[in-house]
Amino acid sequence: CRLNIDGLLVYFPYDYIYPEQYSYMLELKRTLDAKGHGALEMPSGTGKTVSLLSLIVAYQRAFPLEVTKLIYCSRTVPEIEKVVEELRRLIDFYEKETGERSSFLALALSSRKNLCVHPEVSSLRFGKEVDGKCHSLTASYIRAQRHSDSSVQTCRFYEEFDALGRQVPLPAGIYNLDDLKSFGRRRGWCPYYLARYSILHANVVVYSYHYLLDPKIADLVSKELAKKSVVVFDEAHNIDNVCIDSMSVNITRRTLDRTQSNIETLQNTIQRIKDTDASRLQEEYRRLVEGLKEANVARETDVYLSNPVLPDEILQEAVPGSIRSAEHFVGFLKRLLEYLKSRLRVQHVVQESPPQFLKDAFEKVCIDRKPLRFCAERLRSLLRTLEIADIADFSAVTLISNFATLVSTYSKGFTIIIEPFEDRTPSIANPILHFSCMDSSIAIKPVFERFQTVIITSGTLSPLDIYPKILDFRPVTMASFTMTLARACLCPLIVGRGNDQVAISSKFETREDIAVIRNYGNLLLEMSSVVPDGIVAFFTSYQYMENIVASWYEQGILENIQRNKLIFIETQDAAETSMALEKYQEACENGRGAILLSVARGKVSEGIDFVHHFGRAVIMFGVPYVYTQSRLLKARLEYLRDQFQIRENDFLTFDAMRHAAQCVGRVIRGKTDYGLMIFADKRYARADKRGKLPRWIQEHITDSSLNLTIDETVQLSKHFLRDMAQPFKEDQLGLSLLTLDQLQSEEMLKKIAQIAHQI
Amino acid sequence: MDEEPERAKRWEGGYERTWEILKEDESGSLKATVENILFKAKRKRVFEPHGQVRLGMMRHLYVVVDTSRTMEDQDLKPNRLTSTLKLLEYFVEEYFDQNPISQMGIITTKNKRAEKLTDLAGNPKKHIADLKKAKDTTCVGEPSLYNSLSLAMQTLRHMPGHASREVLVIFSSLTTCDPANIYELIKSLKALKIRVSVIGLSAEVRVCTVLTRETGGTYHVILDESHYKELLQYHVKPHPASSSSECSLIRMGFPQHTIASTCDQDSKPSFSMAHLDSSGSGPSLTLGGYYCPQCRAKYTELPVECKVCGLTLVSAPHLARSFHHLFPLDPFTETPLQDYQGEKFCQGCQGELKDQNVYMCTSCQSVFCVECDLFIHESLHCCPSCIHSQPNPPGI
């Protein structure tokens, strides 16, 4: 239907609309009007994606000069595909309504592994191998060599694309990954490079976070995207961790060993080239003297998205003389490597700031700050000059040089921690150097600065006010939406005590307590006898899960549970887990019933949906706090306190609760779905924990669902499940599902205004 | 531990918290709302006239009763098993009352296997007797949906095409222990046009949802005991026949009941054919009975399928009673008492009309009270005053 959102004509590809979708679009429109950033929370299964797409596409059509492009960032490939399908539906609807073929171009972009059509390369299993192999077939000097020597292998798809693909733009339409591949096969063009080239003039681009947040990739892919774009980060509740991960570097002994061999290869290659083709190195040297002027010009004219790894200062200067020549640079790298090796030979934990590290480096091996800064750029130039085909092999030395640049550029927001062994295994020496980013705003800052509107959205983004703080941006809209329901299809219960009145909690003092473990076991046992089909149980960590399951086994609880349902366990092994998941779903499907024991922050808690019978109940055993003894975390907490005035406890609770919300949110994936959410820890009843859950869960927690005993929980669950099993008449119409007429009624508009909860 | 007063105690958990819907009226009295609740409960039975559709009148129904471990749960009083068996006795009576030319059998399942409690038969007595006996069974192990359904299927597949083949599963457990993939079985049930309905005693189980959806049955989960009874009641009425079921003329015999007088020289006590195989129980030698018009085999009870020549033996009133399903009495219109002008007496019981609403027959405009309305629709199936006004009721 056609909607009027605050004066904007929006085509909505469904006959009915949820009230919260309308409300969501209103907020979104306001954000776009203000050309500002926004953070919006709306429960999953309420059509967030389609609301986003239809409003922004409508906005693009109405104001083509204001908003030129939508960049939609999602997390996984299946999610990307889903977005593209929604978009296809929307554009089909446009064509049907307006009767004209639209000139709309939208496409998904993913890694080479998902897009490659080269018969040999695409059969490789790992992403890295594909990238490396692709590079060895398409690098410019390889192709140049082919002119003289026809035995050199190249990729014919890339050749075709390079010859023809850039002249003719990709025809208008919606392309998911498979569409791109089949188009590429038909034309004989490389889909990956075609997609990368086409995102520049596409109206909508759907890709993964990393293409925008990871400086190494963003520099290649997203550098030239127009400023007047709208960027959407979907499922953004973990965005700060993605930012931090993309800026952090971990160096182990293995990395150093591989760097060593990298450097040797470099040296040999340089030697060889020097003997055969010395002019090439001369040419490079000349270029370096001129400095990185080009990049500087580009940045000043605001053509590119800036790269946080390439700090402003170095653009203005020439590469320092000490590392300008290739041999000197390799010598420099060697010195750096030796220094790092010596640092890893520690017996106790060292924590220091980047300036301390630099000072120490200067004192010990006379490495100055300035050449360090140019390290990453210099290495890239060298690799280009040396025409090294398989770039994947040089990941170790690239990592080291990135580290060198980062450590010398940022004096704040990072910390260096060197640990001689892991905490759990103090006897095994496994030294590791963490160069850890503590400020998530560093990686995302260019995005906020460059694009006029950035929307951060997710089903669980509570408490909303912390995100602007840790990401350091000023949003114009922040809102949390609730779910309007025809029936109360979610039932959050907080279990605080066992039947023996012993308080249950995963807190450190009581987690080994046999009574607590037994009560947890009893809870699972009782629930397994009243909940049909699938139950998903989350523990706070793998270690805790192992301990508990072991003592359940000893107490015989496990055996009793198995009389009701089969038990599957998530492990750290991805293949094992996906096998367990598959069998779990099979057991739910054919009426055997199953329990999946998994871990908060694990793969299951983040990416897997348990629709309908695959998850009728989620049990959250304990509050999933991060491992607070970790030095990285401590350093980050300290930083957050000093820089952003966020108290340690607030952040820890926030982090624990968002993961808890993520876990329990797995069961409700739509309005026809239903599920129990059981929080098995006394501490959830406290206002400071409860208040940090998303509003759409919070509003279903009543006083009578706090601090229950196991028996009471079972009674309430039974009651809830029976209620939910009653035939669900499609009477949500008019209440939680609206037609156009209903939407326009005065009364409904008033109700809708209450759905959005501004912060 | 400080208990909060509003929390439900364990012993309260099972009850509906009706006080939550109570509201005081202006004078502060609860009477009006209480009456309203009672009243609604009476009228709860929804009338869903099918209109003119073909009904599967000759029903062959297997009732599968779960007697697994979960049946010992005490959320129905005294426990699920006893409560279920009691309700089933009532159901069996109702079923044969409303569907005289139909048959029924009972299967129980526990400990991963299924066994027949009673064979498919048209006589309520034996079923009820066996149900009574079943009260002492111990509930152990898990049920097997697969085994019970395939057991039912073995018999039902040989039933003639014009008869409706049905299975009603009373499913208490949340799991089923199956020897093979149940989805294959569902496919073959669907192919054989066996309609499977499920009444769940605890919660919605996925496999039952699929099972009922695929085979065209219904799936309900009980809320409490009265709801349970209602759901069983729902299965008493015949359901519309699937359009693909065969139409055929059926040969039926209408035997006369002959009582041989003792003075008749030729009369000898004889065995009823129905009693021959069920060894032991009941008086086997009788004087009179129904004699099959085709082969003269004797039966003491109708309806029955002749053991000798396979003829369906019924009596005329049986057919007549099935007949009303095809032409259900239209629901009476409900009007508030104050709007109704006229004599405030019920045409049925002659009592004074006191409830909020009165019910009016759409054809003869007579009014009835709630009780009479229910009685007319559930038992009589015709409006007494319509019959009364017509001196010659339409022939049956």
Image (tube, rainbow, N blue to C red):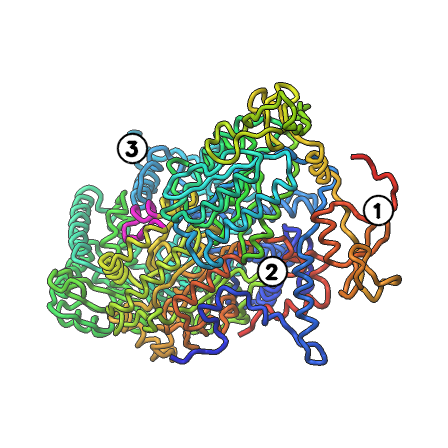
Does the magenta run of residues contain A570? yes
Query: Is disc 1 on the same chain as disc 2?
Result: no
**Residue at the image position 26 percent from the left and 51 percent from the top:** A395
Label 3 and label 1 in one chain = no
Q: Residues within 10 Å of mark 2 (few under 14, many from 20)?
A: some
The chain letter under disc 3 is A
Residue A666: name its quadrant. bottom left
Which image quarter is the C terminus of chain B in? Answer: top right
Q: Is residue B306 left or right of residue A542?
A: right
Q: Chain of mark 2?
A: A
Q: Which residues are magenta?
A: A565-580
Q: Nearer the viewer, residue A552 or A750?
A: A552
Residue A170 x, y percent position in the rendering: 53, 42
In this figure, what is the number of numbered marks? 3
Return the residue nearer the eye: A555 or B296: B296
- Which tag is nearer the camera, tag 3 or tag 2? 2
Q: CA distance from mark 3 to mark 2?
A: 66 Å
Q: Amino acid at mark 2?
A: Ala
Q: Amino acid at mark 1?
A: Cys
Q: Indicate which disc residue B386 carries.
A: 1
Q: Crowdedness of circle 1 by 10 Å Cα count: few (<14), some, many (20+)?
A: some
Residue at which label 2 appears: A486
Which numbered tag is attached to residue A152? Answer: 3
> For the residue carrying disc 3, how many other residues have a C-alpha within 10 Å: few (<14), some (14-19), or many (20+)?
few
Compared to residue A602, the image places residue B389 above or below, namely above
In percent of width and height, residue A243 lies at: 37, 63
* Quarter of the image where the N terminus of chain B is located: bottom left
**Rendered position, B235 above or below B150:** below
Say which element carries label 1. Answer: helix
User: Disc 2 or disc 1, which is closer to the eye?
Assistant: 1
Residue A656, how many percent across, how many down?
37, 68
Q: Are marks 3 and 2 on the same chain?
A: yes
